[in-house]
Image (tube, helix red, strand yellow):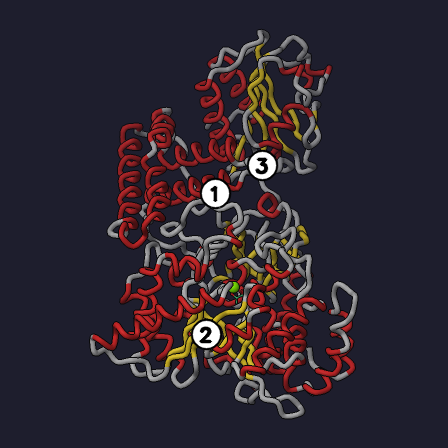
């Protein structure tokens, strides 16, 4: 291969060698041209005249099918397969058996390698494996230019190179220009073939042992606290110890691959066999396996426990992200996020918004079109992604980024201006937070406190359950940072889409309606009490506000409140300093409460409306499912009437009420909330400037009169009408 002979004769030699060693009558290589067509580049056994003549369109014929599926096809009678497409120039009539494997590079097929035999035979499993290993080596050689001279390679599409614009949905506002970082392929496999098989085997064994020890460490000492959920992490541990996984890895190394290449090969095998599964449970397991592979690769490269190093201006590219995934990256370098799937109300996106990272989601075909290191623009103003943008596009976007920066500077100037409406109503603007790092921006935003501290974020970023002291340390740091400003701590809101590997219970068909939030806390009082104990300890002499998520009945609130009282008594018995003042509140997220506020409110010190969940339950539309999450509009008569009913019930009992869902941070939505009478809004920090500008330009009484008329509308959404109202009243939305 390393010789100087012309490329064509190298390829001819490759197919001849493969055909000989696999005892096949035919061996052919097809590579993809930039046009998307698959071209026959070399063959042993088919008509030589077909080389560079036979071309198959995307998805055409069995070769196209292998390319599309990204996995092997092993057929004893190829012509009877529905995808078979006969090409007379190849003279392939007499061949029945066919085995084809994709040439995979970075998870993307760049061509196909095929062997054929006259007889109707099925290729054995080890033959399939052999051909896959050959294909892997071949793909690497084609891609790195070892095999094809540059002239011939010019038009072979190894990786997309042209500028592209892909349409998606706006998830988190903003604009970013940077360099693509692929979330799913953290470690590149550089060297494929082992110089010393024994040494590679030893490296693999050491890395697997390291991985197993790391997972055992996560499990250690948590049986008592975790109860049945312990089993889930245990499953994870069992996967790492799985004989078949270990066996496949060792087999791959024994076949002559480096340990890294072996992991990569076993991974593509798993992806191929399980990746197309629709069943969410299997998809989750694929996710676990991917995660194990990534961890193992990091152990091999000696980076077992380290986080990834990002380039400056990184744009993260992923299929989807779990809530904790984003937090594993260095946020000072993360500029933007592009997701192939996802939904705007998922917690990962909420984290993105909290971190002020622009995000465009549901970008179809994204991961196939972008390469690690490509220049990328995230345009979350229009919901588009530009891959390898042309200089004029970069210039236009950079100019828009400048304008945004000016607007921000304008908001910064308003930082110390209190938010009064034009008719003198004070609107308190608070921020949502969840991590110690959020505290840095508290002062910067001019927020008047933290209206929602999502305590579960600490749990999501830890590898294992945060202990009592770790919890109280964080809470006390939050209170220190807030100084005299109020902080509302929400107790753990786990379950739903916020699952922890070490705390997940059994699989649920409807997790959003399942065992989550306060339900989990009440059934597992040890966990909730530990948290309450940590909160009381952290407050020590300072005021403490605690609220419970997803309360669905008055009894649940009573039971939760009783636990607070118990913990307070416990602390007092031990002579620990009590909070200066303790207020206990409920989140209004379950529609059931709307018809029992008269009973609930007298038991609470305050309430906060979680519109993200309230809307999902009100409209029976899963906030995490892109097909349904945006079907309804919170600016619609039913949603606004529900909010108005809450506001009025709180007025009747004199209960302080805030809104802390995402809508509170969007100027138009916040305008509607103020018009309905809400005077406390808690939102992602990035929303505060724009919402304050809205409040300052708003006449509340006029807004109230305007919105009242819209509540009876028969339309599904009154967004347009509210926009007109804001325009008429010259409100800055
Ligand atoms: C909500 O549901 O509106 C809310 C603020 O809580 P979370 O988004 O964390 O569920
Ligand atoms: Mg909620």
Mark 2 and mark 1: span between their CA atoms? Answer: 35 Å
Front-most of residues 586 and 35: 586
| Residue closer to the observer: 633 or 36 | 633
Q: Residue at x 37, y 52 (%)?
A: 503
Mark drawn on residue 284: 1
> Pointer 3: what residue?
150
Marks 1,3: beta carbons within 8 A: no
Marks 1 and 3, the one that precedes in the sequence: 3
Residue extending furthest toward the left: 574
The disc label shown at residue 626, or none? none
Q: Is label 2 in a helix, a strand or a loop?
A: strand
434 in relation to 160, above or below: below
Q: Is residue 84 left or right of residue 291?
A: right
Q: Pick whichever, 135 or 234, lies toward us.
A: 234
What distance separates the C-alpha of mark 1 from that of mark 3?
A: 41 Å
Residue 299 position in % (x across, y down): 32, 44
Q: Is mark 1 within 8 Å of ligand 1?
A: no
Q: Horizontal placement of 724 versus 592: left or right?
A: right
Query: Is residue 33 shown to the viewer in this render?
Result: yes
**Is residue 146 in sight in this rendering?**
no
Q: Indicate the position of residue 662 as horizontal and vertical percent values.
A: 57, 68
Residue at the disc numbered 2 = 585
């Amino acid at each position: 291969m390393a010789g100087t002979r012309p490329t064509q004769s190298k390829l001819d030699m490759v197919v001849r060698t493969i055909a000989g060693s696999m005892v096949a009558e035919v061996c052919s290589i097809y590579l993809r041209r930039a046009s998307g067509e698959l071209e026959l580049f070399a063959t042993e056994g088919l008509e030589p005249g077909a080389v560079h003549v036979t071309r198959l369109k995307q998805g055409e014929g069995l070769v196209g099918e292998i390319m599309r599926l990204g996995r092997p096809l092993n057929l004893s009678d190829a012509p009877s397969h529905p995808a078979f497409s006969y090409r007379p120039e190849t003279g392939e009539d007499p061949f029945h058996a066919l085995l084809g494997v994709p040439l995979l590079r970075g998870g993307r097929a760049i061509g196909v390698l095929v062997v054929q035999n006259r007889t109707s035979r099925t290729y054995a499993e080890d033959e399939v494996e052999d051909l896959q290993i050959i294909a892997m080596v071949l793909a690497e050689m084609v891609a790195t230019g070892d095999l094809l001279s540059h002239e011939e390679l010019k038009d072979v599409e190894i990786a997309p190179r042209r500028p592209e614009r892909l349409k998606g949905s706006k998830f988190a506002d903003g604009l970013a220009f940077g360099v693509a970082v692929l979330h799913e392929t953290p470690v590149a496999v550089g060297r494929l073939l082992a110089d010393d098989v024994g040494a590679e085997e030893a490296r693999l064994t050491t890395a697997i042992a390291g991985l197993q020890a790391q997972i055992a460490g996560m499990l250690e000492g948590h049986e008592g606290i975790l109860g049945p959920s312990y089993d889930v992490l245990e499953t994870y541990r069992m996967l790492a110890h799985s004989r078949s996984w270990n066996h496949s890895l060792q087999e791959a190394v024994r076949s002559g691959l480096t340990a890294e290449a072996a992991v990569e090969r076993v991974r593509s095998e798993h992806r191929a066999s399980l990746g197309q599964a629709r069943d969410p449970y299997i998809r989750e397991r694929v996710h676990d396996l991917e995660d194990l592979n990534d961890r193992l690769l990091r152990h091999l490269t000696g980076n077992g426990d380290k986080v990834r190093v990002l380039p400056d201006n990184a744009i993260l590219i992923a299929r989807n992200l779990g809530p904790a995934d984003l937090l594993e990256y260095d946020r000072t370098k993360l500029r933007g996020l592009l997701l192939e799937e996802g939904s705007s109300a998922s917690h990962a996106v909420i984290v993105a918004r909290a971190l002020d990272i622009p995000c465009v989601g549901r970008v179809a075909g994204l991961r196939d079109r972008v390469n690690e290191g490509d220049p990328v623009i995230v345009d979350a103003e229009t919901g588009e992604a530009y891959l390898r943008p042309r200089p004029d596009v970069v210039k236009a976007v950079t100019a828009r980024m400048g304008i945004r920066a000016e607007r921000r500077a304008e908001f910064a100037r308003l930082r110390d201006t209190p938010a009064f409406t034009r008719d003198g109503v004070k609107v308190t603007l608070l921020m949502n937070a969840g991590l110690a790092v959020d505290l840095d921006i508290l002062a910067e935003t001019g927020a008047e406190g933290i209206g929602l501290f999502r305590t579960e974020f600490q749990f999501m970023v830890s590898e294992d359950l945060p202990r009592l002291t770790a919890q109280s340390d964080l809470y006390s740091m939050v209170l220190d940072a807030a100084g005299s400003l109020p902080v509302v701590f929400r107790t753990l809101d786990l379950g739903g889409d916020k699952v922890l590997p070490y705390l997940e219970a059994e699989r649920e068909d409807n997790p959003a309606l399942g065992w989550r939030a306060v339900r989990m806390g009440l059934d597992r009082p040890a966990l909730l009490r530990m948290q309450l104990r940590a909160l009381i300890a952290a407050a020590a002499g300072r005021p403490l506000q605690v609220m419970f998520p997803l309360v669905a009945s008055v009894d649940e609130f009573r039971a939760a409140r009783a636990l607070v009282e118990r913990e307070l008594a416990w602390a007092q018995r031990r002579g620990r300093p009590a909070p200066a003042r303790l207020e206990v509140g409920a989140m209004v997220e379950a529609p059931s409460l709307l018809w029992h506020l008269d009973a609930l409110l007298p038991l609470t010190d305050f309430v906060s409306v979680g519109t993200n969940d309230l809307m999902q339950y009100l409209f029976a539309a899963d906030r995490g499912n892109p097909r349904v999450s945006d079907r309804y509009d919170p600016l619609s008569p039913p949603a606004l009437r529900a909010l108005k009913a809450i506001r009025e019930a709180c007025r009747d009992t004199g209960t302080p009420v805030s809104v802390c869902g995402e809508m509170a941070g969007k100027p138009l939505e916040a305008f509607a909330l103020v018009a309905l009478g809400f005077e406390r809004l808690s939102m992602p920090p990035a929303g505060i400037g724009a919402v304050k500008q809205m409040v300052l330009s708003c006449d509340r009484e006029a807004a109230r009169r305007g919105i009242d008329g819209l509540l009876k509308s028969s339309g599904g959404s009154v967004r347009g009408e509210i926009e007109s109202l804001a325009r008429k009243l010259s409100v800055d939305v």
